[in-house]
Image (tube, rainbow, N blue to C red):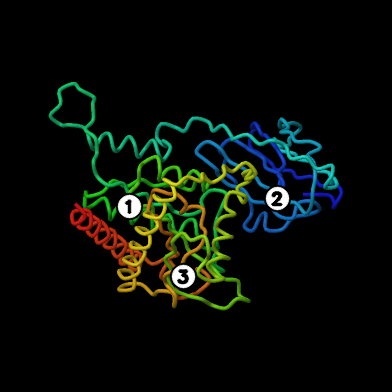
Amino acid sequence: MAGDERQTRFILDLDRKVDARAFVLANPYRVVIDLPQIAFNLPEGAGKSGRGLIRSYRFGMVMPGASRLVFDLAGPAKIEQSQVLEPENGQPSRLIVELAAVDKAAFQATPPSTPAPTQPAPSQPAAQDMQLRSTVVADADPESTGSTAAKPDARQVIVIDPGHGGIDNGTAAPSGENEKTIVLDFAKALRDQIEKSGKYRVVMTRDDDTFVPLGERVRIGRNHAAALFVSIHADALPKREGDAQGATVYTLSDKASDAEAEKLAELENKADAIAGLDLTEEPAEVADILIDLTQRETRAFSNRFAKTLVAEMKRVARMHKHPLKSAGFRVLKAHDVPSVLIELGYVSNKGDLQHLVSESWRSRTVGSVAQAIDVFFGKRVVSAGASR
């Protein structure tokens, strides 16, 4: 990076020329550069500080086949030039982005378009395709002769949602462990544990280091008519705010249960902005009496599962002093899918971090979550039978 608060240039060396597409966004001011899926080989700590108009930057995969660079800007700016140069005269191919400061009145956000991923390699299908494919194979009738029709799978669907991913690392421990990796490891272990019983069908919102927008996570739950949506996260507190510890289970509420819950929800709800998505055209909530009634029932089921989950987890895991909380998490807002968000612990706490990276702790805690799911669905079946 070179330049000052009036003009700034960013140069990234590449091992070959690729297509790049750049645009600017407001609220907050950002520059987004879409690239095909590439491997970033940058020094540790790259992007945490910037220069001139670029306050900081981040990078990573946003979907299979597509990567992204996002610059957090010090103020409004325009892209004067964005190009990828051919390698020549012994110099590598280079991505060059030149920015110039403008005032707020002159700033104009350029309309972003969803990056078009290249087709994933056959050996690495997209997560949802992989899930659907495995379901068809599992449901196929072994007695069928030449027929490709699959039996419908009547099992309840559980969606497991590992938070963050790709360009969005989530929180980070002082020793370097990233939330996105910790929660993905936990989610995979939970999926394997649940699938062992054969009682449920499990869908993952991501099963690799890919960014998934919050709205898409909600849609995955609704599109699969999920009976339960479990989002997995790990919290952190800045040093100046003390040293909290233990796991917490959150449900959706318009009014947060406390200031800490409200602050956490605000941070988690910024995930799309972190990945450089434009949030100005989010669809408005649909106000409808039927949806309202469904949502009330859904929240009642969510609260019931949350209480069951806390009861099971506290047998094996250290819990927060107030383990049951609520706040306005966007990822929990499917009006017809019971949903909870589990904060497994604080990566900023040494004791919690030791647990979070421990296979024995993970195994015990995964077992408690799986047990809570069994208890929850057992109660729902009994309740439904009694109501008839």
Label 3 sits on residue: 353
Residue situated furthest top in the rendering: 146
**In this rendering, position of residue 117 left or right of residue 80:** left
- Image point (34%, 73%), residue name: 314
**In this rendering, position of residue 20 left or right of residue 344:** right
The percent position of residue 277, horizontal first and vertical second, equals 61, 44
Q: Quadrant of residue 342?
A: bottom left
Element under disc 1: helix
Q: Nearer the viewer, residue 253 or 316?
A: 253
> Is there CB contact under 8 Å for labels 1 and 2?
no
The percent position of residue 129, horizontal first and vertical second, equals 39, 35
Q: Nearer the viewer, residue 47 or 280?
A: 280
Label 1 sits on residue: 191
Q: Amino acid at mark 1?
A: Arg
- What number is the disc on residue 52? none
Label 2 sits on residue: 27
Dot 1 or dot 2: first in sequence order is 2
